[in-house]
Amino acid sequence: MKKFNVAVVGASGNVGREMLNILVELDFPVDNVYAVASSRTAGTVIDFKGKDLIVQDLATFDFSNVDIGLFSPGGSVSAQYAPIAVKAGCVVVDNTSHFRMDPDVPLVVPEVNPQAIGGYTKKGIIANPNCSTIQMVMALKPIHDAATITRVIVSTYQAVSGAGKDAMDELFEQSRATFGSGKIVPPKKFTKEIAFNVIPQIDSFLDNGYTKEEMKMVNETKKIMDPAIRVTATTVRVPVYNGHSESVTIETKKKISAAEARRLLENFDGVVVVDDPANLAYITPREAAGKNATFVSRIREDESVDNGLNMWVVADNLRKGAALNAVQIAQCLIRDHLK
């Protein structure tokens, strides 16, 4: 089997480290792996298959020997360095928001729209969707194929790990202070205190009253699945370390029962249905943490509309919501395009 040189850009961050872990778990055919990050963490050591990877400085890194770049360094950094990598002959799978809505850059969830990957030849870049969008479209896809979804209403309950390590530390410090010294730890990563609280804002507000995170879910769902789907979202940060949860309500053109939806989801690759209310069987973010599947629970018919369904969707946002999806894109890339 042909092997590939892979660079993980943003390797010292939460998602970058997960990318390295998943390359090992999925037995990705790597020849050489390069850990790349900003000068702030350049020179530090990261373990990969029991060997030490020295983090290299992105500003001076040479991409000419790299086949695939898995990028997760922040939007402005990807905007600057992804084109440099492409020019050197590297195909970039970018986890930031910068390229997602570029019409010449495919936005891909491999189980949902793998056919879009071929469009990478236009700019040499494939975009990884927003974490909350990924898990939602995983649950929507089989139902849309069977009954045509016309409208989606989603409320998210998003873990602090989605905002990075500093956000996780903030939750820890505020929680510890509550039960310890009682000292107030003012918010830095969030607009309000996150410990024992929920914050109905992720990213900045736009003129239409929605946040950027909410409009990402709207626009990305349309690009990945169907521009005719109407989507409205409310995104909320909750004091959970890892794992995003979503309450999803859908309306369909064709009526579909909860039993049929459950059957479709059970047979969809990457989805695990845990749905037995009589035995309190449903998934929480703590149970989904560290797992690759998108979990769907509480599938039921919406009694307020003619053709509606409600469901609860949970996934590890650092895995399927980011690192895993990126590596799966790379798997499709080498299987179908970089032979």
Image (cartoon, rainbow, N blue to C red):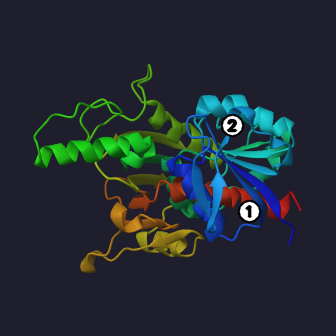
Residue 322 left/right relative to 117: left
Amino acid type, callout 2? Leu
Per the image, label 1 sits on a secondary structure element best described as helix
In primary-sequence order, the first of circles 2 and 1 is 2
Amino acid type, callout 1? Gln
* Quarter placement of the C terminus: bottom right
Rounded to the nearest angstrom, the CA distance separating label 2 from label 1 is 24 Å
Residue 290 left/right relative to 59: left
Of labels 2 and 1, the one closer to you: 2
Task: Check the image and report above or below for 141 versus 69.
Answer: below
Q: Which residue is drawn at 87% across and 67% down?
A: 2
Report crowding for label 2: few under 14, some 14 to 19, many 20 or more residues within 10 A (C-alpha): some
Quadrant in the picture for residue 289? bottom left
Which residue lies most toward the top here?
A: 207
Give how far across and how far down residue 313 sits, in percent: 42, 60
Residue 20 left/right relative to 184: right
Quadrant in the picture for residue 295? bottom left
Report crowding for label 1: few under 14, some 14 to 19, many 20 or more residues within 10 A (C-alpha): some
Give how far across and how far down residue 53 sits, in percent: 65, 55
Task: Check the image and report above or below for 113 versus 188.
Answer: below
Give how far across and how far down residue 154 sits, in percent: 41, 47
Q: Which of 54 and 65 is in front in this view?
A: 54
Which residue was labeled with disc 2?
Answer: 58
Which residue was labeled with disc 1?
Answer: 331
Per the image, label 2 sits on a secondary structure element best described as helix
